[in-house]
Image (cartoon, grey):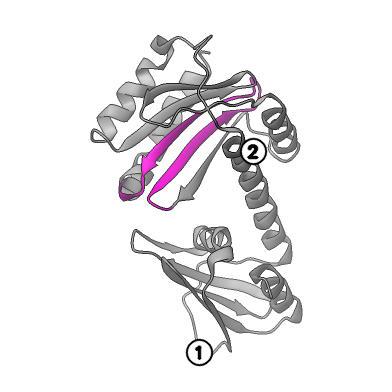
């Protein structure tokens, strides 16, 4: 049975349970009390997560769960979340949209367009911010893409070609229906690397950075500053 079915089923019963999960790169515990998810913890070699962030990270890797043990909840647990049926549904829906948007991009990658590149000078502030925060070699690449294609601004990446017009338009239309913000940022874990992207829903464009997983903790400390640099750059182009 899928984790999604188990969680919704246990919440629906109104009972109290603990789910112990083991994945190749981590382990997690989800505690349910009286039909509410009240605590989630997830640990990997790189980081420890709790609360809603932990729940999202577990959901993202449910396809590689090695074992799942369900036991009645005994004793008290440290509460770090209050998640009912409606909130859980919202989390699954938002993660599915994020997954499909990223998959649309990755499925179409084959070579970077060489013509009609954006002016690199527009990205100077962003590049300076990233260079100041991260050591050399931490960021594999910084990419810009819009309805016309994808362009490498800096870094190392295999040659790729892409036609993002239709998939990116579809993504923008779907996310616009549920998000009122002009800019939306996402993080996608990819094992030793992760992708950080900021989308401009008005111009249907985005900036994406491929970052080393070992810098995840440092990245999170500076995420607000990085997001601000990405947004500032997107507003120029």
Element at badge 1? loop
Say above or below: 25 vs 237: below
Q: Position of residue 1 (x, y in %)?
A: 69, 76
Above or below, comparing residue 210 to residue 42 in the picture: above
Query: Which disc number belongs to residue 75?
Result: 1
Question: Where is residue 64 shown, x and y percent of the image?
Answer: 53, 66
Dominant secondary structure of the magenta stretch? Answer: strand
Residue 110: x and y, percent?
Answer: 54, 30
The mark tally for this picture is 2
Give the number of the disc on residue 104: 2
The mark that comes first in sequence, 1 or 2, is: 1
At a point 43% along the width and 45% down the height, the residue shown is 194
Residue 212 is one of the magenta-drawn residues: yes
Residue at position x 67%, y 71% in the image: 2
Q: Residues within 10 Å of mark 2 (few under 14, many from 20)?
A: some
Q: Quadrant of residue 183?
A: top right
Q: Within 10 Å of the Cα at label 1, are there few (<14), some (14-19), or many (20+) other Cα atoms? A: few
């Amino acid at each position: 049975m899928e984790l999604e079915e188990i969680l919704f089923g246990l919440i629906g019963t109104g009972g109290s349970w603990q789910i112990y999960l083991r994945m190749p790169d981590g382990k997690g515990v989800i505690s349910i009390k009286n039909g509410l998810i009240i605590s989630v913890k997830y640990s990997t070699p790189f980081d420890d997560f709790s609360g809603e962030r932990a729940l999202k990270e577990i959901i993202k890797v449910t396809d590689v769960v090695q074992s799942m043990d369900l036991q009645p909840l005994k004793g008290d647990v440290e509460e770090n979340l209050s998640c009912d049926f409606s909130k859980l549904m919202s989390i699954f829906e938002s993660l599915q949209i994020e997954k499909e948007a990223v998959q649309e991009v990755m499925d179409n990658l084959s070579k970077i367009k060489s013509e009609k590149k954006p002016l690199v000078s527009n990205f100077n502030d962003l590049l300076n911010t990233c260079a100041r925060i991260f050591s050399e070699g931490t960021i594999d690449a910084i990419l810009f893409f819009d309805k016309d294609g994808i362009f490498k601004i800096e870094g190392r990446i295999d040659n790729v070609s892409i036609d993002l017009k239709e998939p990116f338009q579809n993504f923008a239309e779907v996310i616009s229906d549920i998000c009122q913000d002009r800019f939306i940022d996402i993080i996608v874990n990819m094992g030793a690397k992760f992708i950080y992207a900021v989308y401009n829903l008005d111009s249907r464009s985005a900036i994406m950075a491929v970052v080393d997983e070992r810098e995840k903790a440092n990245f999170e400390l500076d995420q607000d500053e990085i997001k601000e640099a990405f947004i500032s750059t997107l507003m120029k182009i």
